[in-house]
Amino acid sequence: MNKEAFIPDFPKYPELTNELIKECRERCSYGPIAFDYYRCTAQVVVYIANIKAQSAALAKLPLQQLHVFRGLLSRIARLMRAIGRLGHKLQDREAIIILSRSVTESSLRLMWLVREDTETRVKLFVESGLQAEVELKELIDKNVAARGHEIPLESRILRSIDKTANAGGLKIEEVRKKIKLPDLNSMMRNIDMADMYLALQTMPSSSVHGNWADLYLHFLTENNGELVPLNSESKVDDVIYLGQSMVVLLGLTYYIKHLITDEGLKSAFGQYLGEAHDTVLFMIKDSGNDDFVKAQSHLREAV
């Protein structure tokens, strides 16, 4: 059994040849191929999210786990698709950074969920994600008790709450109160990625919350000694696509190891994802070397 037989038309990443590397270095950008790798990675997420659970090559996961994993992968894929549409226009860098932060968080959570003690962690994930519903149900129940009857809107909301909890494998009455997931810093320490917390969480969060650094870097420009609104579009950096592809590929690798029991297929997937990850990592490192950075600086000054 191999990956081609398992899933037809599996996405093929473009080859990063020595000639292409030379061209990218000359123009001081991995832009086009970085975007192609991002697009292919998004396609891989869609393929893996839609793997049929009935295959003999897969672990027999409880529905609660399977549904959570599919939901996370679907979220990653749809957000990456949105980012790809924006990036295709070579603009809206600010919006792309914000969306990318959500892709990163979902990928890291997926890694944390399948790393160990998956059954307990998935249940915790579902319970923590139903806290607002628990509070809302308590408020509605309180209002109904005081009034003596339900109004139609309350009945619809209560049915929706029950349906959402049931889809997560729980009854709303079973959900423990004040349950929280570990923060992302703790999750990243658990999956041995603590050294990337600043780059993957702290810095992008500035854009999500609109902190001063984000306002200054992305929304203001200097004019006659003042800062005024930036009205022009800002180009998307290659590293945004490359960094996202790297994190998502890591998440998929973790998930495949958890999902697939057939050793031959698991090895084929691992090799496929590993080769793509290594190529992305090469482009990230090459983009950061001194000569590349100096050339980019001279190019910007020339422009």
Image (cartoon, rainbow, N blue to C red):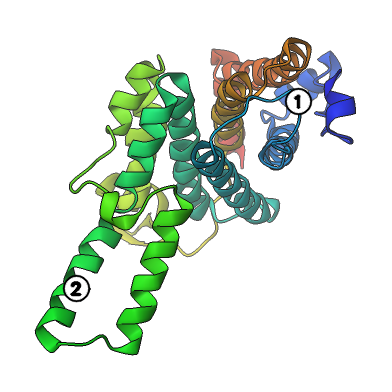
- Any mark on residue 145, and which? none
- Residue 39: where, in percent of width, then height? 72, 41
Q: Residue at x 77, y 15 (%)?
A: 268
Res. 89 image quadrant? bottom right
Nearest the viewer among 37 and 133 is 133
**How many C-alpha atoms fall within 10 Å of the one at disc 2: few (<14), some, or many (≥20)?**
some
| Position of residue 222 in the picture relative to residue 282 (left or right) | left
The amino acid pointed to by label 2 is: Asp
- Residue 294: where, in percent of width, then height? 55, 21
- Please identify the quadrant where the N terminus is shown: top right
Eyeballing the image, is 67 above or below 145? Answer: above
Report the Cα–Cα distance between label 1 and label 2: 46 Å
- In this figure, which residue is indicated by the disc labeled 2? 141
Residue 129 visible at all: yes
- Residue 192: where, in percent of width, then height? 40, 14
Nearest the viewer among 49 and 78 is 49
| Label 1 close to label 2 by CB (< 8 Å) | no
| Position of residue 256 in the picture relative to residue 62 (left or right) | right
- Residue 56: where, in percent of width, then height? 76, 25
Residue that extends furthest to the left in the rendered view of this protein: 146
The amino acid pointed to by label 1 is: Ala
Q: Earlier in the sequence, mark 1 or mark 2?
A: 1
- In this figure, which residue is indicated by the disc labeled 1? 56
